[in-house]
Amino acid sequence: MSVCRKLGNAQEAGTLKGKGKERKSVLAKSGAGKTAEKTFLGMGPGGWIVTMTSFLGWTLVNIDGSFFSFVYPLIQKDLHLPDSAIGIIISSMALSAMLATLIVGPLMDYLGRKRIFQWTILFTAIGSALSALSMGFASLLFARCVCMAGSTSEWAAGQTMVTEGTPKNSRGWWTGFAQVGWPVGWFLTTWIVMGLVPLWGWRGVFWAGLAPILLLLWVRARVKESPRFEDIAKLRKESRAAAGQKHEALESAAAQVKTQFKTNKGEALQFTYKQLFKSDLRARTILFWIWMFVYNYGLFSVAYFLPSIAQNHGFTLGDSWIINAWGTGIGAVGYLVAAFCGEKIGRRNVSIIWLSIGGVFGALFGFCSYTWGLMALWWALYYFFTVGHMGVVAAYVLENYPTRARGTGGSFVSFSVWVSLLLAGLTSQTLVSVFGVEIATFLWLGIASWIACACALGTPKVKPGLELEEINV
């Protein structure tokens, strides 16, 4: 009996051991047996790194980019530049931004998000340093175009990194948080300019623009490339290697490549701009483009010429700086509130609500800016809502594009922004002379907000919390 008991115990132990091995195997496949990654506020180290990198990058490049709009009256006086020269510089900056954003999208989708992000930071810092060294119209024009090419391209690169590197349940929040770098950059610019101009003049302001170099060193050391991009890059590389010189065999070769993330393999092999205008993406691409174009045309027409608009109302250059500080400071809160609400009721819905309300305060800015305090109030509330809706737009636009063309989609939408800047530089003075400053600002801040809202109504409804591949492949 004791022998039988020993045999039974041995068999039971073997069975339990086998079950243990089987359970380990299942856990390994599911990932449940792995040590959980340490998280803070629901996000791991990798997500925090890309989010803070994007936030700091967007802040720093907007500081550099906005220096010019704050100190151009001082530059004009020092370098003896006429008003027409400033208009040409702003228009050229817009052309530089347009060209850069058209190019940088496909580069991101073929060379990687991290690499292009580094280039954008470097161009911004070099452009700022060259601005400080400018001795006349030509050198200043070149410097501002270099800076603009870098700063405007940073948006798509940084926001794409955050969209692909943060958890699905809080992706909108963290993308919105990173987007706050825009108003924070303008807000900090106010204090940098007020602090440095009395000490070092306008050139000292631009020397402060070398700060992004420190971020560049951080990126090279800490930021990792997006796994989603690496998956697409692997698909393209292995497909071409398998197909060889036979182009017609490329799609069938792609079908055999195993990918970590679900994707439309046939579409992924096509040029990314072609993908944007295929039937599955065409309508949203057009609506996003018009939405961003109209909204930003109105914003730039006022934001870049706020000193002149303030003077039209009888306020000083210093008043315009304080008005801007109020707007951008409170606007940063609008971004965060929008991002939070977007995770609850949907980013499209928040955009529609924010744009509707923001247009009302834009109208008040146009018709009821009797004192600089009132102008600051309307500007702050317009910034909170209309500009603050960008706290959800970045995530909403980028999640509507598949990984195979996400960089190109984001950059093409960004391209519309700089087309609007060009138009603002060419037409703002004409509109003021024809309609007067009050009606012109009503068109820019009120009507433009409502047109953008109408475009938002036509875009897809996306439920918060979905994986990117559940929205579009």
Image: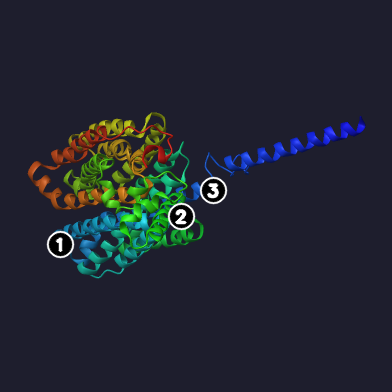
Looking at the rendered structure, the secondary structure element under dot 1 is loop
Residue wearing tag 1: 82
CA separation, marks 2 and 3? 14 Å
Residue position for label 3:
45
Q: Residue at x 24, y 39 (%)?
A: 283
Q: Are marks 1 and 3 in contact (CB under 8 Å)?
A: no
* Residue picked out by circle 2: 225
- Residue 123, above or below 181: below
Q: Amino acid at mark 2?
A: Glu
Q: Dot 3, crowdedness within 10 Å: few (<14), some or many (≥20)?
A: few
Percent across and percent down for residue 229 are 42, 52
| Distance of label 1 from label 3 (alpha carbons) | 51 Å
Tell me the crowding category of disc 1: few under 14, some 14 to 19, or many 20 or more residues within 10 angstroms, Cα based. few
- Disc number lying in front (2 or 3): 2
Q: Position of residue 16 (x, y in %)?
A: 75, 35
Q: CA–CA distance between discs 1 and 2?
A: 46 Å
Q: Are marks 1 and 2 in contact (CB under 8 Å)?
A: no
Give the percent coordinates (x, y) of residue 46. Answer: 51, 49
- Say if 25 sits above or below 151 in the image: above
